[in-house]
Image (tube, grey):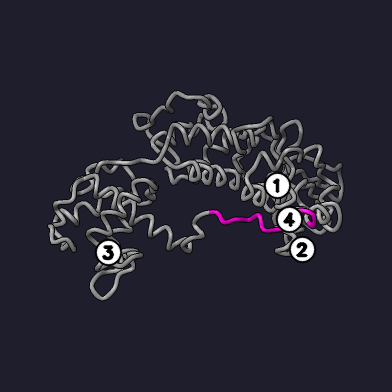
Amino acid sequence: MTVSKHMATRWTHVLPLALAVAVGLPLSLPAQSRRSLPEGPGREIVQRVCGSTCHGAELVAGKGYTRDSWGAVVNSMVSRGAKASDTELTEIVNYLATNLPPKTGAAGAGGAGFLGGGSDEAQMVDVAAAERGRTVYIAECITCHGVKARGGPRGADLIRSMIVLKDRYGSMLGAFLKAGHPMQSGKPSSSLTGPQIVELSHFLHEKVGDTLRNGPYSKPINVLTGNAKDGAAYFNGAGGCNQCHSVTGDLAGVGEKYDPVSLQQKFLFPRTFATPRGGTRGHVPPVVVTVTVTPASGPSVTGVLSHLDDFNVSLRDSEGNYFTWKRTPSLQVVKHDPLAMHEKLLDQYTDKNMHDIVAYLETLK
């Protein structure tokens, strides 16, 4: 057995690292390139939860995403080990979505309005701008490139075009069109204005996104297709959900708190994060997985699980001491995961069970 002791590691060191990886940021920035977070409700909690002496919260200050995309970033943080309550995560998403919205620009030739996105930074589509871009596309491009921009006998497939795929807010598209390209109206493509190029860029990126996400399934579909009565029977019977949960306790009002899609995600994959409807509601502590390790000789040690695989197990006890063991046949390891039953049920649910449970949970107003 190998035992090492360190001061307790603060989760605030883990969160910014996970956030940096999630949004594609470098792990360190020179002081002169760091930006401060804008003022606004929730700024302090972002700084407290995400900030550290290693990777400060200002790493995200130059980014700009939609609410859904910021939610995905936070989910990625959680999946990488970030620790914060649902309430704190909701406040972080609310702050980021409000104060760091998607970047937009007024691109001219060569994408003059492109706001600093790198080659690995996806363009965040502005739906309203994409709709205006659709008008430009119908007027000037649809005859050759088709309704879905997939091309045809007279024009290239724009979804697979490297100019479109590398474009960010008109950066590549603007330069191409300003150089001259036939349009169906007979006008030169150089006559398109900067805003029209940006809007056309949003439309084309929207079409690319639709293709990558299998068209209409890029938007949440209706998941309220089950039978609430059957869901209640499964909840209180074969599913055994009522052994850990109470509709008058921890699940009281859950149907009002979350939309149906979030309800489905939360009960199928409870470690994920979903923004409640209407903002925050109370404090929800993070789920903690613990482990008890008993060596062949010596006392058992219990603490918060840090790492577990076929070869090693590590934990941190209540005093902040860190322990690690090499796994052998004589080493007993007992994991205590409050969400283990959810993972077990994933192999047992039928499609009907899942939809029935969502329908039932949605009635808990």
Secondary structure beneath disc 4? helix
User: Does the stretch in magenta take in 229?
Assistant: yes
Which residue reaches farthest bottom?
153
Q: CA distance from mark 2 to mark 4?
A: 10 Å
Of the numbered discs 2 and 3, the one sitting upstream in the chain is: 3
Say which of 141 and 198 sits in front.
Answer: 141
Residue annotated with mark 4: 343
| Side (left or right) of 80 relative to 29 | right
Q: Amino acid at mark 2?
A: Gln
Q: Amino acid at mark 1?
A: Glu
Say which of 95 and 231 sits in front.
Answer: 231
Q: CA distance from mark 1 to mark 3?
A: 43 Å
| Side (left or right) of 104 relative to 48 | left
Q: Residues within 10 Å of mark 3 (few under 14, many from 20)?
A: many
Residue annotated with mark 3: 142
Q: Residues within 10 Å of mark 2 (few under 14, many from 20)?
A: few
| Side (left or right) of 285 relative to 97 | right
Of the numbered discs 3 and 4, the one sitting upstream in the chain is: 3
Which mark is drawn over residue 348? 2
> Which region of the structure is painted magenta?
220-230
Say which of 124 and 305 sits in front.
Answer: 124
**Quadrant in the rendering for residue 50:** top right
Comparing labels 2 and 1, the label whose residue is closer to the camera: 1
Residue annotated with mark 1: 362
What residue is rendered at 75% in x and 30% in y? 319
Q: Residues within 10 Å of mark 1 (few under 14, many from 20)?
A: many
Comparing labels 3 and 4, the label whose residue is closer to the camera: 3
